[in-house]
Image: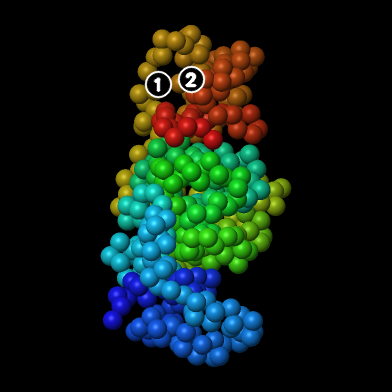
């Protein structure tokens, strides 16, 4: 009799885009040779077209288990199945968990406290700044999970890597396929310093139906899902809905009332999502985790820097991880607005601060990323 992990691998190879079918078959399956018969019986009980039925039966009848396992071995594709001890416990709890997770990178990240951060592909400068700011403040108590898409997803991964924090990308393709191509360099860095995972077998390309299914894994791995900017029909809202169905926390960052990308987070907040205006708001949901504010870490940075003039030191001590308007900074430091703006420009050039929309500035983390710039 084959091991249960072999049955998982076979069902994933055949029904990778219908995980609910794989879950049903896994409960009944005893031998690999029975897959075509049980699958055909299942398909005839469902309202599927003859073309769809023929496609899956062809996959089942053409599947060669030894050939498939050898191909994974030869191509150095790592994987864990639902029956393996290393499979994430959080993910086992969801409806139709993936039978197999193919991965590349640091698998140990899966056993830690994971937080999903998702949002619009068409992010604004506000959304980017908020994502960077929150992830830097969240620190290393959370592993950041997202989907490697353009926009908020990519910024979440990039910010984590640059701050030497742990991050996981859940793909909607095979582990050997890069999508979108725009994120090729980020994909490579994630494989080297983060973790890439997917339920799709090697060679499977992108398809519009894959990404909503992928989103259930993003939320299913995580203790909570944080949404930063999302339109009414954003995939980020699908992830948030999965999180609610999985009895996980949902967080949302408010935005401008003039931005259509605020409609998603505001709708979530209206329906009971937890408001996030700082990293500490996330930590409130997890009292077992120790929150250390960046303000505490920045006290060391407030010691006199002998490369600063007295005016520069006065300005620097009033810049923190909390955004401050340049007019308020001028009042607090006593430095006139003209010279202050010159100092702000110099601080930005030397990578000490970030300039936010509306003439706000915020101190950058003192961590130096070892993974290069993006």
Judging by the rendered image, the residue that carries numbered circle 2 is: 316
Q: Is residue 17 above or below residue 281?
A: below
Label 1: how many Cα within 10 Å (few below 14, some 14–19, many 20+): some
Q: Locate residue 340: give its quadrant.
A: top right
Please tell me which residue is depicted at 55% across the width and 51% down the height of the picture.
178
Mark found first going from the N terminus, 2 or 1 = 1
Q: Is residue 63 left or right of residue 263?
A: left
Q: Which mark is residue 311?
A: none
Q: Is residue 232 above or below residue 13?
A: above
Q: CA distance from mark 2 to mark 1?
A: 8 Å
Label 2: how many Cα within 10 Å (few below 14, some 14–19, many 20+): many
Please tell me which residue is depicted at 41% across the width and 68% down the height of the picture.
67
Q: Is residue 209 above or below residue 118?
A: below
Q: Can you say which quadrant of the picture contains the N terminus?
A: bottom left
Q: Is residue 308 above or below residue 299?
A: above
Q: Locate residue 74: give its quadrant.
A: bottom left
Q: Can you say which quadrant of the picture contains the C terminus?
A: top right
Q: Locate residue 82: give its quadrant.
A: bottom left
Count of all numbered marks drawn on residues in the image:
2
Q: Nearer the viewer, residue 114 or 37?
A: 37
The residue tagged with tag 1: helix, strand or loop? helix
Please tell me which residue is depicted at 47% across the width and 70% down the height of the picture.
13
Q: Nearer the viewer, residue 273 or 167?
A: 167
The residue tagged with tag 2: helix, strand or loop? helix
Please tell me which residue is depicted at 46% across the width and 75% down the height of the picture.
63
Residue 206: x percent and y percent?
59, 60
Q: Which mark is residue 302?
A: 1
* Residues tagged 2 and 1 counted as in contact (Cβ below 8 A): yes
Q: Nearer the viewer, residue 176 or 137?
A: 176
Q: Is residue 119 shown to the viewer in this render?
A: no
Residue 201: x percent and y percent?
48, 64
Q: Is residue 81 shown to the viewer in this render?
A: yes
């Amino acid at each position: 009799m084959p091991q249960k992990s072999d049955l998982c691998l076979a069902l994933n190879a055949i029904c990778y885009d219908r995980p609910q079918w794989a879950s049903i078959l896994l409960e009944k399956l005893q031998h690999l040779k029975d897959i075509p018969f049980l699958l055909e019986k299942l398909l005839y009980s469902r309202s599927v077209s003859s073309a769809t039925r023929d496609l899956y039966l062809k996959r089942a009848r053409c599947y060669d288990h030894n050939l498939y396992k050898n191909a994974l071995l030869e191509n150095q594709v790592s994987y864990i199945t639902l029956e393996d001890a290393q499979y994430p416990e959080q993910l086992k709890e969801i409806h139709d968990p993936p039978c197999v997770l193919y991965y590349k990178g640091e698998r140990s990240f899966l056993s830690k406290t994971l937080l999903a951060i998702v949002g619009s592909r068409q992010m604004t400068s506000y959304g980017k700044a908020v994502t960077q700011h929150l992830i830097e403040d969240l620190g290393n108590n959370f592993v950041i999970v997202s989907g490697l898409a353009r926009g908020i997803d990519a910024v979440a991964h990039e910010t984590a890597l640059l701050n030497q924090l742990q991050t996981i990308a859940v793909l909607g393709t095979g582990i050997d396929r890069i999508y979108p191509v725009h994120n090729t360099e980020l994909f490579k860095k994630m494989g080297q310093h983060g973790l890439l995972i997917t339920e799709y077998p090697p060679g499977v390309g992108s398809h519009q139906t894959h990404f909503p299914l992928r989103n259930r894994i993003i939320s299913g791995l995580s203790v909570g899902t944080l949404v930063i900017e999302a339109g009414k029909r954003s995939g980020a809202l699908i992830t948030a809905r999965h999180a609610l169905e999985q009895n996980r926390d949902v967080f949302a960052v408010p935005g401008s009332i003039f931005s259509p990308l605020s409609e998603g987070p505001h709708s979530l907040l209206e329906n009971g999502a937890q408001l996030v205006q700082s990293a500490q708001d996330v930590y409130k949901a997890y009292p077992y985790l120790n929150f250390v504010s960046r303000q505490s870490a920045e006290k060391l940075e407030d010691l006199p820097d002998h490369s600063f003039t007295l005016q520069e030191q006065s300005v620097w001590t009033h810049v923190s991880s909390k955004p401050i308007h340049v007019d308020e900074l001028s009042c607090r430091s006593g430095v006139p607005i003209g010279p202050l703006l010159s100092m702000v420009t110099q601080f930005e050039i030397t990578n000490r601060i970030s300039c936010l929309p509306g003439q706000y500035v915020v101190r950058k983390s003192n961590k130096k990323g070892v993974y290069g710039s993006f």
